Image: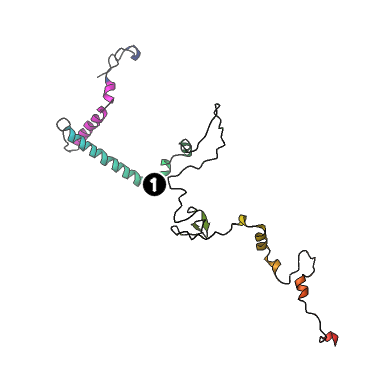
Amino acid sequence: GTRPRPDVDTDDKDFLGDNFVRHTGDVTKLAHMELHAIHAKEAGRQLPHLQAEPSRAEAVFKEFETKKKDLEDRRKTQILQRYGGQEGNRPSAVVEGLQQSEAYVEYDSEGKVINNTKETIPVSKYPEDVLDKNHTAVWGSFYKDRKWGYACCHQTQRYAYCTGRGREKRPWEKTEREMKSERTPHLTKRGVKSLTGHGKESEGTAKRRRKPVKSDPQFV
């Protein structure tokens, strides 16, 4: 097992030794089992003998490794909950950018993109574009009064059934006449002078003026 002729350079040797065999296969696992048995004996525990009961000794070693791993995981979770630091376990944006995506891109012989591809949104682990309860829009497509809902029926309850009522028109979907009537409601009131008449009374106001009769004081 030792390295032969340590005084000779490695490149000049015909035989480099057989130490490499001790680090392949189950040799490392057997060494860990032997070390575990030595530590257990030093602590006063009696374990199955490796040569007399190899199967039982291996089962005890596997059980020990499982319990050890569970204990380390629990300690790690407790430390993270008390002191924080979960941000370090999340992959950075650079690493996420190197992951595979569902975007289809074609390249020419020079490595340039030949088709105009739009920026793709990464797929999350949550279900997306799922329509349920007869809705035609997804949950979260509508927001009003600090509540999320469905854009198709303006329901703000998560599991409400779609009523099928048409949604209200958004400001950018209204016609010019509708927006003008909302901005200038005072122009339709009675007795208001027209903006284009330059101070003249409207025809309806002129017709409704009371005509003088002979009984008035001015004719007496």
Q: Quadrant of the C terminus?
A: bottom right
Q: Quadrant of residue 89?
A: top left
143 and 29: which one is in front?
Answer: 143
Q: Residues within 10 Å of mark 1 (few under 14, many from 20)?
A: few
54 lies above or below 7 = below
Q: Does the magenta stretch include residue 60?
A: no
Does residue 93 appear in this view?
A: yes
Tally of marks: 1
Q: Position of residue 70 (x, y in %)?
A: 29, 42
Q: Quadrant of residue 73?
A: top left
140 and 11: which one is in front?
Answer: 140
Residue sitting farthest toward the right: 219
Q: In this view, does 156 lie to the left or right of 75?
A: right
Q: Is residue 210 left or right of residue 175?
A: right
Stretch of the chain drawn in magenta? 19-43
Q: Where is residue 119 in the image (x, y as percent from the top left)?
A: 54, 40
Q: In this view, does 207 lie to the left or right of 68?
A: right
- Residue found 41% across the figure and 44% down from its top: 86
Q: Does the magenta stretch include residue 23?
A: yes
Q: Position of residue 201 (x, y in %)?
A: 78, 70
Give the residue type that dot 1 points to: Tyr
Q: Where is residue 15 in the image (x, y as percent from the top left)?
A: 29, 14
Q: Quadrant of the N terminus?
A: top left
- Element at badge 1? helix
213 and 180: which one is in front?
Answer: 213
Question: What secondary structure do most residues of the magenta stretch adopt?
Answer: helix
> How did the renderer colour the structure?
rainbow
Does residue 41 appear in this view?
A: no
The residue pinned by badge 1 equals: 83
86 lies above or below 13 = below
- Residue found 65% across the figure and 60% down from its top: 178
